[in-house]
Image (cartoon, helix red, strand yellow):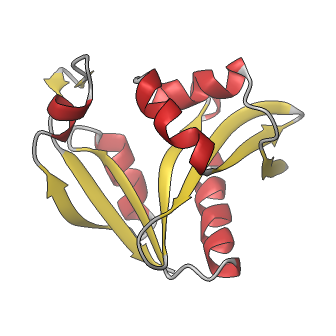
Amino acid sequence: MSLIIQKIKTITTQHFSLLKQADPDEDMINSYIYRAFLFECLYNNKIVGVLVLNQNKGNALEILNISVLEEYQHQGIGSALLVFTENFAKENHYSTLEVCTGSTSIWQLYFYQKHGFRITDIQIDYFLKNYSEPIFEHGIQLKDQLRLKKVV
C-alpha cells in the first residue's frame, strides 16, 4: 500500500468530516485545529485519513485527532499515521507522545496499547463536563477520558 502523508494546506469538508468521525463536537475541533499541525493521508490521491498534532507541555507532542475512513480501517493506515507521528516527534525533538481517548473507546485503547502507549491518567467525567451532547460507545455512555503516553 502506497500512502502519502502531507501537511494540510486548506481544511476541506472532507477533512472536517474525518475529524468529526473521531470527535463529534465541532466546537471542540474548532478549538484545536488552528493551533496544531494538520496532516492528511492520501491513498491513490484520495484522502483516507487525517492527523492532528499539538505541542504539549515540555517536550511532549499530543495526538489530538487521528481518523481513517471506515472502509480503509484495519489496513495499516492508522499504524502508518502513528509511525509518521513518531518520526515527526523525533525529527522535531519531542521525547514523549501523548493521546487522550474515551474509557469506552475499546478499539482505540487496543490500538494505542498495541503500539506501546501506556495509560497514565484518568480524567473522571471529562466528557460529561466538556461535551454538550452525550456520547455513547458500545451501548455505554462515555464519561471518563484516559491519557496514554509513549516515550519516543
Residue at horizontal 58 percent and vertical 49 percent from the top: 35
Image-based side of 139 in relation to 97, left or right = left
Image-based side of 56 in relation to 118, left or right = right
Q: Is residue 146 above or below residue 40?
A: below
Residue at horizontal 65 percent and vertical 40 percent from the top: 50
Q: Is residue 129 above or below residue 95?
A: above
Whether residue 74 is visible, yes or no, is: no
Residue at horizontal 68 percent and vertical 63 percent from the top: 84
- In this rendered view, identify the residue nearer to me: 73 or 123: 123
Q: Is residue 74 above or below residue 109?
A: above
- Number of labels in the image equals 0
Residue at horizontal 57 percent and vertical 55 percent from the top: 53
Image-based side of 90 in relation to 135, left or right = right
- Where residue 71 sits in the image (x, y, percent)? 62, 25
- In this rendered view, identify the residue nearer to me: 120 or 127: 127
- Where residue 6 sits in the image (x, y, percent)? 81, 50
Q: Quadrant of residue 43?
A: top right
Whether residue 45 is visible, yes or no, is: yes
- Where residue 89 sits in the image (x, y, percent)? 61, 73
- In this rendered view, identify the residue nearer to me: 131 or 104: 131
- Where residue 137 sits in the image (x, y, percent)? 26, 26
Q: Residue furthest left?
A: 124
